[in-house]
């Protein structure tokens, strides 16, 4: 009997979430620092004028310092605002202050923040629960990023803790792989 990709993803999500909860705080801190440093060292980061960065929550790789570094470098920074089921938009922020809990509890700008056209984004920093070396991400299951990435032309970078890197993440034709997967140990360029 054949499992569907969706079922395989659900099973993997459960296992990864359990693994994330078992991670020691020291590893989380060191991993966050290593991922941040590796991302900020990428030439794609240096060249990007406009970046779209997720606002981390829980035990996701921390993005607060990444957003701050982008703002201090004079980059245009946009963060996600989730609307109805599966629909996300990029809203420009001048700082992390003024963000408030959104649809899923993550911090978001409100509707008064400027809307950014996806085609103007140079670099997308995407979250994942897990990823593989080929750029396929295991997200939270809402499909927000795959739908949004289909509208962008910039480089997509996925942040993944090294301990959560998988040999193969189940994927189908609708899943859009990241161009680069960044862990605290190494980067995998899939272009």
Image (tube, helix red, strand yellow):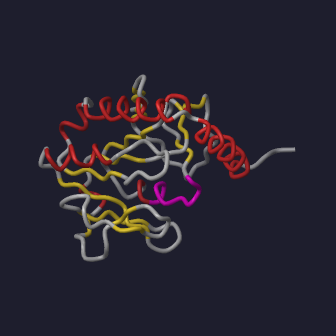
- Which quadrant would residue 78 be assigned to in this image? bottom left
If the image is split into quadrants, where does the N terminus sit? Answer: top right
> Taking 73 as reference, is 18 left or right?
right
> Taking 106 as reference, is 112 left or right?
left
Q: What percent of the width, then of the height, locates residue 156?
A: 37, 43
Q: What percent of the width, then of the height, locates residue 34?
A: 36, 29
Q: Is residue 141 magenta?
A: yes
Outermost residue, top side: 185
- Which quadrant would residue 35 be assigned to in this image? top left
Answer above or below: position of 105 versus 75: below
Instruction: Read off the magenta span.
Output: 140-147
Residue occupying image coordinates x 50% and y 32%: 134
Residue occupying image coordinates x 23% and y 31%: 43
Q: Is residue 55 magenta?
A: no
Q: Nearer the viewer, residue 89 or 27?
A: 27
Q: How many marks overall?
A: 0
């Amino acid at each position: 009997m054949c499992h569907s990709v969706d079922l395989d993803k659900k099973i993997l999500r459960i296992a990864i979430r359990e693994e994330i909860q078992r991670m020691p705080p020291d590893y989380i801190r060191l991993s966050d620092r290593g991922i941040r440093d590796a991302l900020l060292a990428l030439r794609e980061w240096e060249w990007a004028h406009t970046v779209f960065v997720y606002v981390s929550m829980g035990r996701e790789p921390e993005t607060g310092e990444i957003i701050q570094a982008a703002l201090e470098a004079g980059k245009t920074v946009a963060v996600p605002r989730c609307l109805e089921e599966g629909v996300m938009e990029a809203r420009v922020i001048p700082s992390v202050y003024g963000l408030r809990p959104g649809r899923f509890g993550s911090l978001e700008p409100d509707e008064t923040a400027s809307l950014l056209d996806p085609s103007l984004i140079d670099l997308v920093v995407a979250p994942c629960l897990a990823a593989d070396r080929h750029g396929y991400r295991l997200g939270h299951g809402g499909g927000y990023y795959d739908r949004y990435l289909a509208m962008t032309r910039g480089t997509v970078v996925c942040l993944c803790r090294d301990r959560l890197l998988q040999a193969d993440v189940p994927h189908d034709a609708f899943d859009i792989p990241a161009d680069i997967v960044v862990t605290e140990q190494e980067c995998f360029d899939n272009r």
